[in-house]
Image (spheres, rainbow, N blue to C red):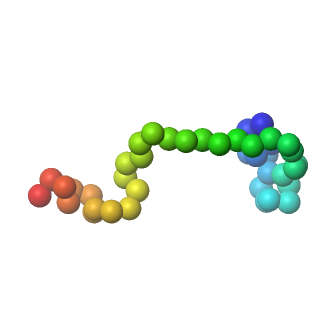
Amino acid sequence: MFEVIRGGKHTTDLVKRDLVHLDIDHKQMGVGGEEVGERNR
């Protein structure tokens, strides 16, 4: 499956399939919010 996604440079290169891929991450850090080092001041 990943080969199909990585092989396309444009959305028109992707092949429609009857498959859904869903990634759910428990935690994520470093996206938006405080500037670097802000928490340590």
Q: Quadrant of residue 18?
A: top right
38 to 8, vertically: above or below? below
Left or right of 6? Residue 25 is left
Q: Quadrant of residue 24?
A: top right
Q: Position of residue 21 (x, y in %)?
A: 70, 41
Q: Nearer the viewer, residue 10 or 26?
A: 26
Q: Quadrant of residue 6?
A: top right
Residue found at x 42% / y 46%: 28
Left or right of 33? Residue 40 is left
Quadrant position of the N terminus in the picture: top right
Q: Nearer the viewer, residue 33 or 10?
A: 33
Left or right of 6? Residue 15 is right
Q: Residue furthest left?
A: 41
Task: Count the labels in the image.
Answer: 0
Residue found at x 50% / y 41%: 25
Quadrant position of the C terminus in the picture: bottom left
Q: Position of residue 27 (x, y in %)?
A: 41, 42
Q: Nearer the viewer, residue 11 or 27?
A: 27
Q: Position of residue 38 (x, y in %)?
A: 20, 60
Residue 3 in view of the camera: no
